[in-house]
Image (cartoon, rainbow, N blue to C red):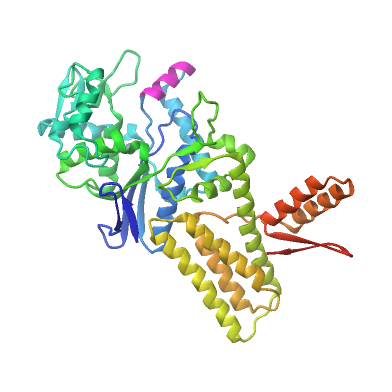
Amino acid sequence: MKLYNTLTRKKEEFKPIKENEVTMYVCGPTVYDYIHVGNARPMVVFDTLRRYFIYKGYKVKYVVNYTDIDDKIINRANEENKTAKEIAEKYIKAFEEDAKGLNLYEEKTIHPRATEYIRHMIDFIEKLIEKGAAYNVDGNVYFNIESAEDYGKLSKKNIDELISGARVDVNEEKINPMDFALWKKAKEGEPYWDSPWGRGRPGWHIECSVMAKTLLGDTIDIHAGGEDLQFPHHENEIAQSETLTGKPFANYWLHNGMLTIDNQKMSKSLGNFFTVRDIAKEFDLEVLRFFLLSAHYRNPINFSKDVMEQLKNGLDRLYNGKSHLEYLLKNCSDRELTQEDRKSLADIDKFKKAFIESMEDDINTADAIACLFDLVKYANSNFDEKTPKTVVQYTYDNLIELSQILGILSKEEEILEEEILELIEKRTQARKEKNYKLADEIRDKLRDMGIILEDTQEGVKWKRI
Ligand SMILES: [Zn+2]
């Protein structure tokens, strides 16, 4: 399998450290607010990669941390007159609900909280000080980036340019303006932990380095997150971890592209900011998951209500194909396979092979989804009650198996015939009222769902395409 490694800027053959196991660390949410659709992208994309590894037979250790202590959490706590812990608890619970809606494989996810690893962080920082890579100035501890080998190797930033660019924001405590805080001295009224440097709390970057090392080991297979985390977050994680252990921190660095809303950057000030739960009011979150997988993960993706509508119809089509096969399973009989039936089995294998090839190529979910559509279309147009059960079952099993990799089609409810008949009735009514625009819209909607209509003398007939 090939994965694009940000570290080398190349697609590389994936080779895990242990033969049958993959370790993955994905930077998780800072729990001070509900997650937005942009936050959902890495969660869905890397969950899909994890599912694919499981499909391939690997045991996967998968960590998504909660940053439960941070300036944003403290500010929110002050605004709402609550403790930082209460704020964190509230938004962790909200994340869990969203994760369930997005069908993230939560029962297989390890969710460490930063505040549970403070002792480990203090140890880590002490060792960096011993090595001369970090220094304490009056209760603030900084990492000296000049002690890191190849600082900038992930983001391909030039250290000298960074230093001159940072001059404006010079912090007099730091030796070098690009040095970053490992430990922050507590300000009045802030939550704190005791440390050899006095009361304080960890910086953000150290959290991920420590939780990854403690839970997954000095070198992990895959570290992943949004591309906005490449610098400084991931760069700093590499600097402190590799300086401490002298080993590579992660062998593969994977980053997903950014999400825009109606082709604009999402921001609260532009009023185009959607949380996952905002979306859940209008769409099943499975549609959001499907949308997030509809583009290659490294490409930018543009969110709009129109695109969501299209994807909802697309997903309905797949559900429709699934229910068609379920209907046939109940209504077809088994018989000897003819040569034509064997050809059908071989055709299904071709769709499956194309799906797997897409996933092997840097998890190209966009192409993998196209293969599912091909499979469903093939079954809709070639199989009926006369098709032997062996063929229908084989097709159905493959559809379910491949859909599980993407984390879709897991719901039992299907597009019932009732829903189709209701739409046909609405269209007939619209035609009677000479509202041809509406009638055409309904026809188009049905077509998107994989249903075509035929107006006959005996009334409207429909079939699946
Ligand atoms: Zn992180």
Q: Is residue 376 left or right of residue 232?
A: right
Q: Residue 60 placed where, x, y %?
A: 36, 55
Q: Residue, x 55% and y 77% (percent of image)?
A: 345
Q: What residue sits 57% from the left and 77% below the top?
A: 344
Q: Is residue 259 above or below residue 372?
A: above
Instruction: Pick whichever, 334 or 356, lies toward us.
Output: 356
Residue ranking furthest to the top? 188
Res 343 quadrant in image:
bottom right
The x, y position of residue 34, in whole percent, is 50, 32
Q: Look at the image and say whether residue 423 sits in the magenta stretch.
A: no
Magenta stretch: dominant SS? helix
Instruction: Count the numbered circles shown.
Output: 0
Q: Is residue 139 left or right of residue 13?
A: left
Ligand 1 position by quadrant: top left
Q: Quadrant of the C terminus?
A: bottom right
- The residue at the point 15 percent across, 22 percent down is 175
In x, y percent, where is residue 374? 57, 65
Relative to 73, say whether 218 is above or below: below
- Out of 46 and 185, give the one closest to the viewer: 46
| Quadrant in which the N terminus is drawn | bottom left
Q: Is residue 77 magenta?
A: yes
Can you see residue 339?
Answer: yes
Say whether residue 112 is visible: no
Query: Which region of the structure is painted magenta?
Result: 71-81
What residue lies at 75% left-to-right and 53% top-to-bottom?
A: 443
